[in-house]
Amino acid sequence: MSRELLRVTGITKRFGGLTVVNDVGFALAEGEVLSIIGPNGSGKTSTLNIVSGVLAPDRGEVHLDGARISGRKPHQIARLGLTRTFQNGRVIGNLTVRENVLVGRDGLGQRGSRLREIPGLRWLPLLAETGSALLRGGGSSGDARRAADDARVDAQLARFGERLLPRRDRFAFTLSYANRRRTEIARALVAEPRLLVLDEPTAGMNQTETAEVLEQLLELKAQGQSMLLVEHKLDLVMTLSDRVIVLDEGRIIAAGTPAEVQRDPRVIAAYLGTTATTGTTEPATAEERTHV
């Protein structure tokens, strides 16, 4: 058995009278790829946001390698080895691809951590760290640091071959949508995380682009990278995942291997609108028909 890396215990999150995550718990082992799927609005992204510190749970706990991380800030959790991408791309358009990726490394520094706790000032440390990453120099030590940074950046960009590496010095706003998403993944990987959290990494990509990202994620998996994934494209999920959790209305309704989950009538009901009692089917939304 692989060592347990992440444990989520009974997390619940409410917004007023709406419960978006309801008593969700699971564990993830080192080197494992665990995917969370479910219809739109089922609580998938909210679960990731709790795990990564973007949201604080109303109840429950999250532990990373035995240390409680629920209640900590995202940058504190990142320093413990959990980095992520977001459902909506977050590259910085007026920085180059290289500079965007460097933010993922320098954002883990200790500098300015107290400022992050002050509303209105939390962006100052990021700006300072970005400036330090871009302007550092001064003698042989600065040159050596830049060379090391460049090697780290190029190693991650090289995962995406001709899609990113030749564009390392281009501004991010010039990139295609798919290449912006790839840049986000590279930025999350440059810190060499113990756990990589991916929120719909292929959203908006066509079939060819999705297949390329799948191959890159399979390579990461072969290298032992632990991943927690939310993704609508079920072919990708079933190919990449060791285990799958299915959410519906904030609750786990099924869990198991990809093959087990695909056969589960509760999963079919959640995606296709089939009720367990009558066997009737309600029409799925256009997006659900696309991804089922």
Image: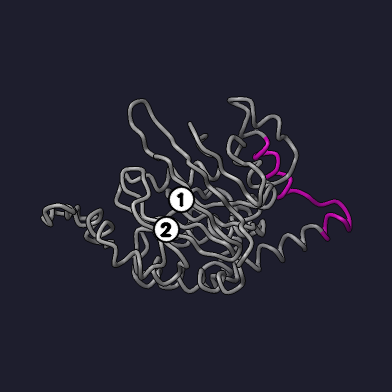
- View extreme (right): residue: 140
Please tell me whether mark 2 sits on a helix, a strand or a loop. Answer: helix
Which residue is denoted by mark 2 in the rendering? 177
Which class describes the residues within 10 Å of circle 2: few (<14), some (14-19), or many (20+)? some
Tell me the quadrant of the picture where the C terminus can be found. bottom left
Which label lies toward us, 1 or 2?
1
Crowding at dot 1, Cα within 10 Å, few <14 / some 14-19 / many 20+, comes out as: some
Above or below residue 140? Residue 22 is above
- As for residue 140 lying within the magenta part, the answer is yes
Residue range (magenta) = 125-144
**What whole-number distance in Å separates the C-alpha atoms at marks 1 and 2?**
9 Å
What residue sits right under mark 1 in the picture? 89
Secondary structure found at label 1:
loop
Colour setup of the view: one colour
Q: Residue 51, image x and y in percent?
A: 53, 45
Residue 99: image location, x then y, percent: 63, 53
For the question of whether residue 183 can be seen, the reply is no
Residue 269: quadrant of the picture: bottom left
Where in the figure is residue 113, as x and y percent of width and height?
Answer: 71, 35
The image shows a total of numbered marks equal to 2
- Relative to residue 139, is residue 205 depicted above or below? below
Residue type at numbered disc 2: Tyr
The reply to whether discs 1 and 2 touch (Cβ–Cβ < 8 Å) is yes
Residue at 65% x, 33% y is 124
Residue nearer the viewer, 262 or 121: 262
From the viewer's side, name the closer residue of 260 and 119.
Answer: 260
Q: Report the residue at 45% width, 69% height from top.
A: 240
- Classify 162 as above or below 36: below
Query: At 21% across and 60% down in the image, what residue appears?
Result: 289
- Residue 129: image quadrant is top right
Query: Would residue 292 be found to the left or right of residue 166 on screen?
Result: left
